[in-house]
Amino acid sequence: MASIRDYLFDTAFLDRSIDYLAEALHLAITVVDSEGIPVASRRTEGCDTPASRAYPFRFSPDIGGLVCAAPDQDLLSQAEPHILYCLASLTTQLLRETELRETTEEMLQLSSQLNFLFKVAKKIIGIDDLKKCYQIILDEISQTIKADQGFIHTKGRWDEEIRVTHRMTGEEMDAARNSICLRRTAAGSTIICTREDGASLLYSPIKEKDGQSGQMVFVRASGHRAFSASEKQLVGIIENIISPTFETLRLYDSLQDLYLNTVKALAAAIDAKDEYTHGHSFRVAKYALAIGGQLEIDSQQLNDLEIAGYMHDLGKIGISELILSKPGKLTSEEFRLIQKHPVFTDKILQPIKLPVRILEGAIQHHERMDGTGYPCGLAGTNISLFGRIIAVADVFDALTSKRPYRDAMPVEEALRTLCDGIDSLFDREMVIAFISALRSDQAREVLGDINMGPRYDDIQNLNQFLIELTEFAMAANRN
Protein backbone atom coordinates (compact mmCIF):
# COMPACT_ATOMS: atom_id res chain seq x y z
CA MET A 1 0.00 0.00 0.00
CA ALA A 2 1.28 3.47 -0.93
CA SER A 3 0.44 6.79 0.69
CA ILE A 4 1.11 10.43 -0.22
CA ARG A 5 3.12 10.71 3.01
CA ASP A 6 5.62 8.23 1.55
CA TYR A 7 6.36 10.60 -1.33
CA LEU A 8 6.53 13.98 0.43
CA PHE A 9 9.79 15.21 1.95
CA ASP A 10 7.84 17.79 3.95
CA THR A 11 4.22 16.94 4.85
CA ALA A 12 3.47 20.40 6.28
CA PHE A 13 1.73 21.56 3.09
CA LEU A 14 -0.51 18.47 3.11
CA ASP A 15 -1.45 19.16 6.74
CA ARG A 16 -2.18 22.84 6.00
CA SER A 17 -4.33 21.89 2.99
CA ILE A 18 -6.58 19.50 4.90
CA ASP A 19 -6.75 21.93 7.84
CA TYR A 20 -7.96 24.62 5.44
CA LEU A 21 -10.60 22.39 3.85
CA ALA A 22 -11.84 21.26 7.26
CA GLU A 23 -11.83 24.60 9.08
CA ALA A 24 -12.67 27.12 6.36
CA LEU A 25 -15.20 25.02 4.44
CA HIS A 26 -16.51 22.89 7.33
CA LEU A 27 -15.72 19.62 5.57
CA ALA A 28 -14.68 16.30 7.01
CA ILE A 29 -11.42 15.36 5.25
CA THR A 30 -9.81 11.92 5.20
CA VAL A 31 -6.54 11.13 3.47
CA VAL A 32 -6.52 7.50 2.29
CA ASP A 33 -3.75 5.33 0.88
CA SER A 34 -3.86 3.24 -2.32
CA GLU A 35 -6.02 0.61 -0.57
CA GLY A 36 -8.46 3.12 0.88
CA ILE A 37 -7.07 2.93 4.41
CA PRO A 38 -7.13 6.30 6.25
CA VAL A 39 -3.72 7.82 7.04
CA ALA A 40 -4.91 11.24 8.27
CA SER A 41 -8.20 13.01 8.91
CA ARG A 42 -9.68 16.36 9.98
CA ARG A 43 -13.30 17.14 10.88
CA THR A 44 -15.35 19.79 12.70
CA GLU A 45 -16.68 18.46 16.00
CA GLY A 46 -20.45 17.96 16.19
CA CYS A 47 -21.01 18.37 12.45
CA ASP A 48 -22.88 15.59 10.64
CA THR A 49 -21.43 14.96 7.14
CA PRO A 50 -23.41 12.23 5.32
CA ALA A 51 -22.56 13.43 1.78
CA SER A 52 -19.09 12.43 0.56
CA ARG A 53 -16.93 12.21 -2.58
CA ALA A 54 -13.53 10.71 -3.30
CA TYR A 55 -10.81 12.71 -5.10
CA PRO A 56 -7.79 10.60 -6.13
CA PHE A 57 -4.33 12.15 -6.27
CA ARG A 58 -3.24 12.50 -9.90
CA PHE A 59 0.07 10.76 -9.48
CA SER A 60 1.73 7.56 -10.61
CA PRO A 61 1.85 5.16 -8.86
CA ASP A 62 -1.52 5.10 -7.11
CA ILE A 63 -1.10 6.75 -3.69
CA GLY A 64 -4.76 7.14 -2.74
CA GLY A 65 -6.55 10.46 -2.43
CA LEU A 66 -8.87 12.67 -0.38
CA VAL A 67 -12.34 11.70 0.80
CA CYS A 68 -14.32 14.88 1.47
CA ALA A 69 -17.63 14.88 3.30
CA ALA A 70 -20.21 17.62 3.97
CA PRO A 71 -23.73 17.97 5.45
CA ASP A 72 -25.25 17.78 1.95
CA GLN A 73 -24.30 17.45 -1.73
CA ASP A 74 -24.88 21.17 -2.48
CA LEU A 75 -22.29 22.27 0.10
CA LEU A 76 -19.89 19.67 -1.23
CA SER A 77 -20.34 20.95 -4.79
CA GLN A 78 -19.72 24.54 -3.64
CA ALA A 79 -16.50 23.43 -1.94
CA GLU A 80 -15.29 21.39 -4.91
CA PRO A 81 -13.25 24.20 -6.63
CA HIS A 82 -11.29 24.64 -3.37
CA ILE A 83 -10.78 20.88 -3.10
CA LEU A 84 -9.53 20.65 -6.70
CA TYR A 85 -7.18 23.60 -6.16
CA CYS A 86 -5.63 21.89 -3.11
CA LEU A 87 -5.31 18.65 -5.08
CA ALA A 88 -3.55 20.46 -7.94
CA SER A 89 -1.14 22.14 -5.51
CA LEU A 90 -0.36 18.83 -3.81
CA THR A 91 0.23 17.20 -7.22
CA THR A 92 2.69 19.99 -8.13
CA GLN A 93 4.57 19.47 -4.88
CA LEU A 94 4.64 15.70 -5.43
CA LEU A 95 6.11 16.11 -8.92
CA ARG A 96 8.76 18.58 -7.70
CA GLU A 97 9.82 16.36 -4.83
CA THR A 98 9.96 13.34 -7.15
CA GLU A 99 12.30 15.30 -9.42
CA LEU A 100 14.42 16.24 -6.40
CA ARG A 101 14.71 12.60 -5.30
CA GLU A 102 15.69 11.50 -8.80
CA THR A 103 18.25 14.29 -9.05
CA THR A 104 19.69 13.36 -5.65
CA GLU A 105 20.02 9.71 -6.68
CA GLU A 106 21.78 10.73 -9.89
CA MET A 107 24.10 13.01 -7.93
CA LEU A 108 25.03 10.25 -5.48
CA GLN A 109 25.70 7.85 -8.34
CA LEU A 110 27.80 10.46 -10.11
CA SER A 111 29.60 11.23 -6.86
CA SER A 112 30.70 7.60 -6.50
CA GLN A 113 31.94 7.63 -10.08
CA LEU A 114 33.89 10.84 -9.52
CA ASN A 115 35.36 9.40 -6.34
CA PHE A 116 36.51 6.37 -8.32
CA LEU A 117 38.10 8.52 -11.01
CA PHE A 118 40.05 10.55 -8.47
CA LYS A 119 41.19 7.42 -6.67
CA VAL A 120 42.59 6.07 -9.96
CA ALA A 121 44.20 9.41 -10.82
CA LYS A 122 45.97 9.57 -7.44
CA LYS A 123 47.36 6.06 -7.94
CA ILE A 124 48.84 6.74 -11.36
CA ILE A 125 50.30 10.19 -10.67
CA GLY A 126 54.07 10.02 -10.96
CA ILE A 127 54.08 6.69 -12.87
CA ASP A 128 55.79 7.12 -16.24
CA ASP A 129 55.39 3.48 -17.30
CA LEU A 130 52.26 3.43 -19.45
CA LYS A 131 51.76 -0.32 -19.02
CA LYS A 132 51.71 0.05 -15.24
CA CYS A 133 49.15 2.83 -15.57
CA TYR A 134 46.93 0.61 -17.71
CA GLN A 135 47.31 -2.25 -15.23
CA ILE A 136 46.20 -0.03 -12.34
CA ILE A 137 43.24 1.23 -14.36
CA LEU A 138 42.22 -2.30 -15.37
CA ASP A 139 42.47 -3.68 -11.82
CA GLU A 140 40.56 -0.75 -10.32
CA ILE A 141 37.73 -0.94 -12.86
CA SER A 142 37.51 -4.74 -12.54
CA GLN A 143 37.26 -4.43 -8.77
CA THR A 144 34.68 -1.64 -8.93
CA ILE A 145 32.33 -3.36 -11.39
CA LYS A 146 33.05 -6.81 -9.86
CA ALA A 147 34.31 -8.34 -13.09
CA ASP A 148 35.69 -11.89 -12.90
CA GLN A 149 38.24 -11.19 -15.61
CA GLY A 150 39.36 -8.35 -17.85
CA PHE A 151 42.00 -7.13 -20.26
CA ILE A 152 43.27 -4.03 -22.04
CA HIS A 153 44.80 -4.36 -25.49
CA THR A 154 46.12 -1.13 -26.99
CA LYS A 155 49.12 0.80 -28.27
CA GLY A 156 51.90 2.50 -26.33
CA ARG A 157 53.73 5.74 -26.94
CA TRP A 158 55.60 4.42 -29.97
CA ASP A 159 52.82 2.16 -31.23
CA GLU A 160 54.15 -0.81 -29.35
CA GLU A 161 51.53 -3.34 -28.31
CA ILE A 162 50.35 -3.20 -24.71
CA ARG A 163 48.47 -6.18 -23.27
CA VAL A 164 47.48 -6.22 -19.61
CA THR A 165 45.11 -8.70 -17.99
CA HIS A 166 43.13 -9.17 -14.80
CA ARG A 167 42.83 -12.82 -13.65
CA MET A 168 43.14 -13.93 -17.26
CA THR A 169 45.67 -15.86 -19.32
CA GLY A 170 46.89 -14.78 -22.75
CA GLU A 171 44.91 -17.60 -24.36
CA GLU A 172 41.71 -16.56 -22.57
CA MET A 173 42.29 -12.99 -23.68
CA ASP A 174 42.65 -14.01 -27.34
CA ALA A 175 39.50 -16.12 -27.11
CA ALA A 176 37.53 -13.21 -25.66
CA ARG A 177 38.78 -10.85 -28.37
CA ASN A 178 37.56 -13.28 -31.02
CA SER A 179 34.18 -13.82 -29.38
CA ILE A 180 31.36 -13.90 -31.90
CA CYS A 181 29.20 -11.48 -29.89
CA LEU A 182 31.96 -8.85 -30.12
CA ARG A 183 32.69 -9.42 -33.79
CA ARG A 184 29.01 -9.03 -34.67
CA THR A 185 28.67 -5.73 -32.80
CA ALA A 186 29.78 -2.25 -33.82
CA ALA A 187 33.06 -1.62 -32.02
CA GLY A 188 32.89 2.17 -31.82
CA SER A 189 31.05 2.47 -28.50
CA THR A 190 30.76 0.82 -25.08
CA ILE A 191 28.47 -2.22 -25.22
CA ILE A 192 27.30 -5.21 -23.18
CA CYS A 193 26.84 -8.55 -24.92
CA THR A 194 26.49 -12.25 -24.05
CA ARG A 195 29.20 -14.68 -25.17
CA GLU A 196 28.45 -18.10 -26.65
CA ASP A 197 29.10 -19.78 -23.27
CA GLY A 198 26.67 -17.47 -21.46
CA ALA A 199 29.29 -15.12 -19.96
CA SER A 200 28.49 -11.40 -19.91
CA LEU A 201 31.04 -9.20 -21.70
CA LEU A 202 31.43 -5.45 -21.27
CA TYR A 203 33.40 -3.98 -24.16
CA SER A 204 34.74 -0.44 -24.48
CA PRO A 205 36.99 0.99 -27.20
CA ILE A 206 40.13 2.99 -26.42
CA LYS A 207 40.26 5.91 -28.80
CA GLU A 208 42.74 8.47 -30.02
CA LYS A 209 42.17 11.53 -32.18
CA ASP A 210 42.47 9.67 -35.48
CA GLY A 211 40.48 6.60 -34.52
CA GLN A 212 40.44 3.56 -32.29
CA SER A 213 43.72 2.36 -30.80
CA GLY A 214 42.62 -0.48 -28.57
CA GLN A 215 39.94 -2.02 -26.38
CA MET A 216 38.99 -2.83 -22.81
CA VAL A 217 36.97 -5.98 -22.17
CA PHE A 218 35.54 -7.23 -18.88
CA VAL A 219 34.06 -10.67 -18.33
CA ARG A 220 31.50 -11.90 -15.82
CA ALA A 221 31.23 -15.69 -15.87
CA SER A 222 28.12 -17.64 -16.86
CA GLY A 223 25.79 -18.09 -13.90
CA HIS A 224 26.50 -14.60 -12.52
CA ARG A 225 24.32 -11.58 -13.28
CA ALA A 226 25.01 -9.67 -16.48
CA PHE A 227 26.74 -6.28 -16.41
CA SER A 228 24.36 -3.38 -15.69
CA ALA A 229 23.72 -0.06 -17.40
CA SER A 230 25.40 1.86 -14.55
CA GLU A 231 28.53 -0.30 -14.87
CA LYS A 232 28.52 0.33 -18.60
CA GLN A 233 28.22 4.08 -17.91
CA LEU A 234 31.22 4.03 -15.57
CA VAL A 235 33.38 2.19 -18.09
CA GLY A 236 32.16 4.62 -20.76
CA ILE A 237 33.46 7.53 -18.67
CA ILE A 238 36.86 5.83 -18.41
CA GLU A 239 36.79 5.27 -22.17
CA ASN A 240 36.56 9.01 -22.72
CA ILE A 241 39.74 9.78 -20.75
CA ILE A 242 42.05 6.98 -21.91
CA SER A 243 44.07 7.27 -25.13
CA PRO A 244 47.25 5.62 -26.46
CA THR A 245 49.19 8.83 -26.01
CA PHE A 246 47.95 9.75 -22.55
CA GLU A 247 50.44 10.86 -19.94
CA THR A 248 49.77 10.95 -16.24
CA LEU A 249 49.47 14.71 -16.11
CA ARG A 250 47.07 14.84 -19.05
CA LEU A 251 44.87 12.19 -17.49
CA TYR A 252 44.85 14.05 -14.19
CA ASP A 253 43.94 17.29 -15.97
CA SER A 254 41.11 15.52 -17.79
CA LEU A 255 39.77 14.22 -14.51
CA GLN A 256 40.01 17.67 -12.95
CA ASP A 257 38.10 19.17 -15.87
CA LEU A 258 35.47 16.44 -15.71
CA TYR A 259 35.11 16.92 -11.98
CA LEU A 260 34.88 20.71 -12.15
CA ASN A 261 32.43 20.67 -15.07
CA THR A 262 30.27 18.17 -13.19
CA VAL A 263 30.33 20.35 -10.09
CA LYS A 264 29.33 23.37 -12.21
CA ALA A 265 26.44 21.40 -13.71
CA LEU A 266 25.23 20.36 -10.25
CA ALA A 267 25.48 23.93 -8.97
CA ALA A 268 23.54 25.21 -11.99
CA ALA A 269 20.83 22.63 -11.33
CA ILE A 270 20.47 23.86 -7.74
CA ASP A 271 20.45 27.53 -8.76
CA ALA A 272 17.79 26.78 -11.37
CA LYS A 273 15.32 25.85 -8.63
CA ASP A 274 14.79 29.57 -8.08
CA GLU A 275 14.86 32.10 -10.95
CA TYR A 276 16.29 34.72 -8.57
CA THR A 277 19.39 32.66 -7.74
CA HIS A 278 20.28 31.76 -11.33
CA GLY A 279 24.07 31.91 -11.64
CA HIS A 280 24.55 32.49 -7.89
CA SER A 281 27.00 29.61 -7.34
CA PHE A 282 29.02 30.61 -10.42
CA ARG A 283 29.38 34.16 -9.14
CA VAL A 284 30.19 33.08 -5.57
CA ALA A 285 32.95 30.81 -6.91
CA LYS A 286 34.39 33.71 -8.96
CA TYR A 287 34.32 36.11 -6.01
CA ALA A 288 35.88 33.47 -3.74
CA LEU A 289 38.68 32.93 -6.27
CA ALA A 290 39.31 36.69 -6.33
CA ILE A 291 39.67 36.75 -2.54
CA GLY A 292 41.89 33.64 -2.57
CA GLY A 293 44.09 35.22 -5.23
CA GLN A 294 44.62 38.31 -3.08
CA LEU A 295 45.51 36.07 -0.13
CA GLU A 296 48.07 34.34 -2.41
CA ILE A 297 46.94 30.83 -1.58
CA ASP A 298 48.48 28.16 -3.81
CA SER A 299 46.95 26.85 -7.03
CA GLN A 300 45.71 23.58 -5.52
CA GLN A 301 43.91 25.46 -2.75
CA LEU A 302 42.44 27.86 -5.33
CA ASN A 303 41.13 24.88 -7.27
CA ASP A 304 39.55 23.44 -4.11
CA LEU A 305 38.16 26.88 -3.18
CA GLU A 306 36.44 27.15 -6.55
CA ILE A 307 34.86 23.71 -6.07
CA ALA A 308 33.69 24.67 -2.56
CA GLY A 309 32.18 27.84 -4.01
CA TYR A 310 30.20 25.89 -6.59
CA MET A 311 29.06 23.37 -3.97
CA HIS A 312 28.16 25.75 -1.15
CA ASP A 313 24.38 25.65 -1.78
CA LEU A 314 24.16 21.99 -2.82
CA GLY A 315 21.99 21.23 0.23
CA LYS A 316 19.22 23.44 -1.11
CA ILE A 317 18.17 20.48 -3.21
CA GLY A 318 16.48 19.30 -0.01
CA ILE A 319 14.51 22.56 0.44
CA SER A 320 11.11 23.04 -1.19
CA GLU A 321 10.97 25.60 -4.01
CA LEU A 322 7.87 27.01 -2.33
CA ILE A 323 10.15 28.17 0.49
CA LEU A 324 13.18 29.15 -1.60
CA SER A 325 11.14 31.41 -3.87
CA LYS A 326 8.66 32.68 -1.28
CA PRO A 327 8.15 36.43 -1.92
CA GLY A 328 7.22 37.33 1.65
CA LYS A 329 8.83 36.87 5.04
CA LEU A 330 9.63 33.30 6.03
CA THR A 331 7.97 31.78 9.06
CA SER A 332 10.23 30.66 11.89
CA GLU A 333 9.66 27.05 10.84
CA GLU A 334 10.57 27.81 7.22
CA PHE A 335 13.69 29.70 8.28
CA ARG A 336 14.78 26.78 10.48
CA LEU A 337 14.44 24.51 7.43
CA ILE A 338 16.51 26.94 5.32
CA GLN A 339 19.19 26.87 8.03
CA LYS A 340 19.47 23.11 7.55
CA HIS A 341 20.77 23.37 3.98
CA PRO A 342 24.46 23.30 5.06
CA VAL A 343 23.66 20.09 6.96
CA PHE A 344 22.07 18.64 3.81
CA THR A 345 25.19 19.69 1.88
CA ASP A 346 27.32 17.79 4.40
CA LYS A 347 25.21 14.64 4.01
CA ILE A 348 25.43 14.77 0.21
CA LEU A 349 29.19 15.39 0.10
CA GLN A 350 30.39 13.08 2.87
CA PRO A 351 30.25 9.88 0.72
CA ILE A 352 32.52 11.49 -1.90
CA LYS A 353 35.44 11.84 0.56
CA LEU A 354 36.49 15.25 -0.71
CA PRO A 355 39.38 17.19 0.86
CA VAL A 356 38.36 18.54 4.27
CA ARG A 357 38.82 22.18 3.22
CA ILE A 358 36.24 21.78 0.44
CA LEU A 359 33.71 20.32 2.86
CA GLU A 360 34.42 23.05 5.42
CA GLY A 361 34.01 25.83 2.88
CA ALA A 362 30.75 24.42 1.55
CA ILE A 363 29.28 23.80 5.02
CA GLN A 364 30.57 26.78 7.06
CA HIS A 365 29.74 29.74 4.79
CA HIS A 366 26.87 30.81 7.06
CA GLU A 367 29.01 30.79 10.23
CA ARG A 368 29.78 34.27 11.59
CA MET A 369 32.80 35.68 13.42
CA ASP A 370 30.82 36.40 16.60
CA GLY A 371 29.35 32.89 16.73
CA THR A 372 25.82 33.90 15.67
CA GLY A 373 25.88 31.92 12.41
CA TYR A 374 24.75 28.40 11.58
CA PRO A 375 24.72 25.41 11.49
CA CYS A 376 27.34 24.98 14.26
CA GLY A 377 27.68 28.46 15.78
CA LEU A 378 31.44 28.55 15.14
CA ALA A 379 33.32 31.78 15.89
CA GLY A 380 36.54 33.50 14.84
CA THR A 381 39.30 31.32 13.45
CA ASN A 382 37.36 28.20 14.41
CA ILE A 383 35.66 28.91 11.09
CA SER A 384 37.83 27.53 8.30
CA LEU A 385 39.65 29.81 5.85
CA PHE A 386 37.39 28.64 3.02
CA GLY A 387 34.30 29.19 5.17
CA ARG A 388 35.34 32.78 5.93
CA ILE A 389 36.12 33.48 2.27
CA ILE A 390 32.86 32.05 0.89
CA ALA A 391 30.85 33.87 3.59
CA VAL A 392 31.98 37.22 2.13
CA ALA A 393 31.50 36.09 -1.48
CA ASP A 394 28.05 34.64 -0.75
CA VAL A 395 26.71 37.72 1.06
CA PHE A 396 28.10 40.12 -1.55
CA ASP A 397 26.36 38.25 -4.36
CA ALA A 398 23.13 37.95 -2.37
CA LEU A 399 23.14 41.71 -1.72
CA THR A 400 23.90 42.66 -5.33
CA SER A 401 21.30 40.24 -6.79
CA LYS A 402 17.57 40.83 -7.10
CA ARG A 403 15.36 38.84 -4.75
CA PRO A 404 11.56 38.38 -4.65
CA TYR A 405 11.37 40.67 -1.62
CA ARG A 406 13.85 43.44 -2.66
CA ASP A 407 15.84 44.96 -5.51
CA ALA A 408 19.56 44.39 -5.95
CA MET A 409 21.86 46.72 -4.02
CA PRO A 410 24.48 48.76 -5.89
CA VAL A 411 28.04 47.55 -5.34
CA GLU A 412 28.96 50.50 -3.13
CA GLU A 413 26.13 49.84 -0.68
CA ALA A 414 26.85 46.09 -0.59
CA LEU A 415 30.53 46.74 0.20
CA ARG A 416 29.60 49.18 2.96
CA THR A 417 27.34 46.49 4.41
CA LEU A 418 30.26 44.04 4.42
CA CYS A 419 32.48 46.61 6.11
CA ASP A 420 29.82 47.29 8.74
CA GLY A 421 29.95 43.59 9.58
CA ILE A 422 33.74 43.38 9.91
CA ASP A 423 34.87 41.41 13.00
CA SER A 424 31.29 40.77 14.11
CA LEU A 425 30.04 38.91 11.03
CA PHE A 426 32.90 38.78 8.52
CA ASP A 427 36.64 38.28 8.75
CA ARG A 428 38.34 41.65 8.22
CA GLU A 429 41.14 40.15 6.13
CA MET A 430 38.67 38.54 3.72
CA VAL A 431 36.69 41.77 3.24
CA ILE A 432 39.88 43.78 2.61
CA ALA A 433 41.11 41.11 0.18
CA PHE A 434 37.83 41.30 -1.74
CA ILE A 435 37.96 45.08 -1.98
CA SER A 436 41.61 44.83 -3.08
CA ALA A 437 40.62 42.35 -5.80
CA LEU A 438 38.05 44.81 -7.14
CA ARG A 439 40.73 47.52 -7.23
CA SER A 440 43.28 45.35 -9.03
CA ASP A 441 43.73 44.37 -12.65
CA GLN A 442 41.99 41.18 -11.62
CA ALA A 443 38.69 43.08 -11.28
CA ARG A 444 37.96 42.84 -15.00
CA GLU A 445 38.45 39.08 -14.86
CA VAL A 446 36.46 38.76 -11.64
CA LEU A 447 33.45 40.74 -12.82
CA GLY A 448 33.81 40.53 -16.59
CA ASP A 449 32.87 36.84 -16.77
CA ILE A 450 29.68 37.43 -14.80
CA ASN A 451 26.80 37.92 -17.20
CA MET A 452 24.43 39.27 -14.57
CA GLY A 453 26.88 41.94 -13.49
CA PRO A 454 26.23 43.92 -10.31
CA ARG A 455 24.96 47.51 -10.47
CA TYR A 456 27.08 50.57 -9.60
CA ASP A 457 25.87 53.96 -8.51
CA ASP A 458 28.94 55.71 -9.90
CA ILE A 459 31.23 53.49 -11.99
CA GLN A 460 33.57 56.40 -12.84
CA ASN A 461 34.42 56.99 -9.19
CA LEU A 462 34.40 53.34 -8.14
CA ASN A 463 38.17 53.08 -7.76
CA GLN A 464 38.37 56.11 -5.48
CA PHE A 465 35.50 54.71 -3.45
CA LEU A 466 37.35 51.38 -3.08
CA ILE A 467 40.52 53.18 -1.95
CA GLU A 468 38.59 55.08 0.71
CA LEU A 469 36.79 51.91 1.80
CA THR A 470 40.11 50.07 2.14
CA GLU A 471 41.54 52.91 4.24
CA PHE A 472 38.44 52.78 6.44
CA ALA A 473 38.81 49.03 6.99
CA MET A 474 42.54 49.32 7.69
CA ALA A 475 42.04 52.24 10.08
CA ALA A 476 39.38 50.37 11.98
CA ASN A 477 41.82 47.50 12.32
CA ARG A 478 44.47 49.79 13.87
CA ASN A 479 41.92 51.17 16.33
Image (tube, rainbow, N blue to C red):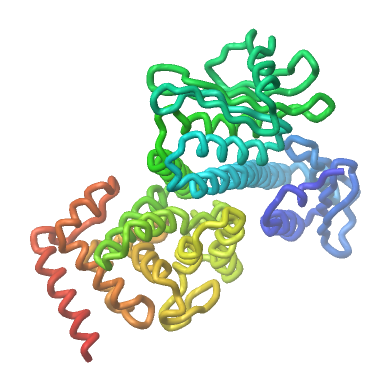
- Of 389 and 324, nearer the camera is 389
Q: From what the image shows, is residue 320 above or below residue 218? A: below
Q: Is residue 152 visible?
A: yes
User: In which quadrant will I find the C terminus?
Assistant: bottom left
Locate residue 29 relative to residue 121 in the image: left or right. Answer: right
Q: From what the image shows, is residue 111 above or below residue 382? A: above
Residue shown at the point (22%, 85%) measured from the top left: 476
User: In which quadrant will I find the N terminus?
Assistant: top right
Residue shown at the point (66%, 28%) measured from the top left: 218
Q: To which quarter of the image does residue 252 belong?
A: top left
Residue shown at the point (32%, 61%) measured from the top left: 298
Most extreme residue toward the bottom, as rendered?
479
Locate residue 196 relative to residue 137 in the image: left or right. Answer: right
Locate residue 22 relative to residue 115 in the image: left or right. Answer: right
Q: To which quarter of the image does residue 331 belong?
A: bottom right
Rendered location of residue 46, percent (x, y): 88, 64
Rendered location of residue 125, percent (x, y): 45, 47
Rendered location of residue 337, percent (x, y): 59, 64
- Of 416 and 251, nearer the camera is 251
Residue shown at the point (45%, 81%) measured from the top left: 379
Locate residue 66 relative to residue 350 in the image: left or right. Answer: right
Q: From what the image shows, is residue 41 above or below residue 255? A: below
- Of 331 and 162, nearer the camera is 162
